[in-house]
Amino acid sequence: MVCSLALLLPLGTTYGQSQPSAKVTAKTANLTLLPETSGTGNWQTLLSNTIKTSNQKDLFINASFEVGLFTQTKVSSKNMTTDTSNATANVQVRVLVDGQVVEPGQVVYGRRTQTLSATLEGAIAACLSLVTNLDGTTSIIVDTNCVTAETIELVLDSMDAAAFSFVAVDVPQGVHLISVQGRIDTTGSAQTGSWTALGTVGKGTVTVESVRLIKDANVPLDVP
């Protein structure tokens, strides 16, 4: 379910448009907005809303989402040969006002890089044989072609909530479309093992507040 809410300004002028001016608007969703995805996908609109400004304003836009990351790495090694697998998953979010990207641009809401490496001897129980040496002693010989690789697998699955504030300055009077977009970016590599990386966006909320910022404010910063 997706819900929206707007706090109207006392000013009732509509400037010839049916939507009244508003100081704050919000939209929330209690469903999965972006399903588990692998690879590098295109930007998808997660939530969108409109707000009408009675005159030139600045917009504070806060976008909060549940972000899920799944990474799996598996290594397979024998004969003391090192094997490495890695997987990276990240969820990126950006905000657009009337189709233009708002500062600070693309933001990473969640990222994980998982690397697994192992150097294993392998399963050799069935690959041993006794050999009698010339001096009469006995040696144990391992048939390396018979050795079966041993495997180690690591799986991590997490879901956390993240939020970030975006700012659009000098937004002109009128009705404006605010769109919050997200995309999944996953990469990985494996030698003889395997890897999987997935990202997802769950529930979310976006709030938009119309304000007037102080321009070129001189704020002292104390640096120890």
Image (cartoon, rainbow, N blue to C red):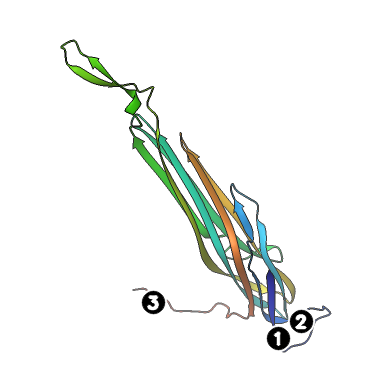
Residue 78: percent from the left, percent from the top? 37, 31
Which residue ends up furthest to the bottom in the rendered image? 10
Amino acid type of the residue that numbered disc 1 sits on in the rendered structure: Leu
Q: Does residue 204 sit above or below 57 in this rendering?
A: above
Which residue ends up furthest to the top in the rendered image? 134
Q: Which residue is mark 1?
A: 9
Residue 7 in view in this figure: yes
Relative side of 206 to 128, left or right: right
Q: Which residue is mark 2?
A: 20
- Marks counted in the figure total 3
Marks 2 and 1 in Cβ contact (< 8 Å): yes
Q: In what element is the residue under mark 3?
A: loop
Quadrant of res 19? bottom right
Relative side of 65 to 140, left or right: right
Q: Residue at x 60, y 48 (%)?
A: 40
* Other-residue count near label 2 (Cα within 10 Å), few / some / many at <14 / 14–19 / ≥20: many
Q: Nearer the viewer, residue 119 or 106?
A: 119
Q: In what element is the residue under mark 2?
A: loop
Q: Residue at x 68, y 61 (%)?
A: 45
Q: Residue at x 65, y 52 (%)?
A: 42
Q: CA distance from mark 2 to mark 1?
A: 8 Å
Q: Which residue is mark 3?
A: 222
Indicate which disc, 2 or 1, sits on the residue closer to the N terminus: 1
Quarter of the image with the N terminus is bottom right
Q: Does residue 35 sit above or below 4 in this rendering?
A: above
Amino acid type of the residue that numbered disc 3 sits on in the rendered structure: Asp
Residue 168 in view in this figure: no
Indicate which disc, 3 or 2, sits on the residue closer to the N terminus: 2
Q: CA distance from mark 3 to mark 2?
A: 43 Å
Please give the label number shown on residue 137.
none
Indicate which disc, 3 or 1, sits on the residue closer to the N terminus: 1
